[in-house]
Amino acid sequence: MVTDTNAEQVLAGEASSSHLKRQRLSSLVEGGENVGEVTGDEVTTTEVRSGMLLDLDLLDCPVCCHALTNPIFQCDNGHIACSACCIDLRNKCPSCTLPIGIHRCRIMERVVEAIMVPCPNAKRGCTDKFSYGKELAHEKECSFALCYCPASDCNYAGLCKDLYRHYHANHRGYCETFTCGFNADAWMHISDKILVLQEGRGGALVAVQCFEEEQGVYVTVNCIAPFAPGVSEFSYQLSYSHGDKSMSFGLDEMDRIQKVSFQTPEKDFMFVPHYFLNGRESLKMKICIRRRGEEQEKKT
């Protein structure tokens, strides 16, 4: 049976605990944010605590070393692992062999979601922030991502617009120019492996590359730019012909790369078989590059 005296003691205890919690919250905050709470006709202000985590590796899965993302699991001994590793390990903890992959580590999930990190390109001007681990996906689409000069023996890297100006100032004698919407020559020796096209003076850079293999030659076309919305978005049509033989290949959206690679491509290429070349060591192709925004305006 609860008497009036006991009830008063319980209420007094709850009020005292709540008061102590508010005191602790206010006394431990350093550089926190003010948060207003509406209670009846009054507005009370509390502060959200913030801190600093010096070693972000603590937020990586101890098994695969990749950033932890929800769901996160733990064994009965408290060892944690990401969901992908739990599957790979067949739900057996690598530290103590106890089952893992059933019980969620809710507190670690909250910590990972609460940690905000800047974009890796923050030093170059990007102001976006993300939950830990999600910044890696953004980095591939960030307009402030570094792009690398396609000229041989040149180590320049910078924002794509800066790279375009650099290339025109230092390497314009080694490239051909193109104008959007018009056919341009794309002639190259197969042994050269790469032909750089630049839009006008200091415009976008497009790398036409060929990769000679046993069966024939693979030809790719890529714009050197980050995969960011509105940055160097082109379509293209590439063609090659000799005598009565011809072939063509195109994409409605040209692939964008930050750095040229000399590995044989697995997709998005025009393949010219050796019998088609008939011993010729050069490719005399035609290419028409269009800016995607202008292309859509014409259709409408």
Image (tube, rainbow, N blue to C red):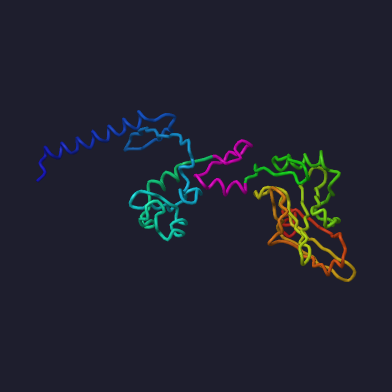
Question: Is 139 a magenta residue?
Answer: yes
Residue that lies at the very extreme toward the bottom in this rendered image = 244
Q: Is residue 296 shown left or right of residue 76?
A: right
* Image location (x, y in percent) of residue 179: 82, 51
Which residue is nearer to you in this view: 133 or 250? 133
Image-based side of 135 in relation to 251, left or right? left
Tally of numbered discs:
0
Query: Residue 17 lies in what quarter of the image?
Result: top left
- Residue drawn at (49%, 51%), measured in percent from left and top? 64
- In this rendering, would 4 be left or right of 239? left
The quadrant where residue 210 appears: bottom right
Image point (41%, 46%), residue name? 110
Residue 55 drawn above or below residue 191: above
x and y percentages locating residue 249 in the rendered image:
77, 64
Nearer-the-camera pick, 211 or 298: 211
Nearest the eye: 116 or 245: 245
What x and y, as percent, mark residue 262?
Answer: 73, 53
Expressed as whole percent of the image width and height from the top left, the position of residue 290 reads 77, 55
Left or right of 230 on screen, residue 136: left
Give the magenta-colored segment's residue range.
118-141
Q: Is residue 271 magenta?
A: no
The answer to which image quadrant residue 126 occupies is top right
Q: Quadrant of the C terminus?
A: bottom right
Q: Is 92 in front, or is 172?
A: 92
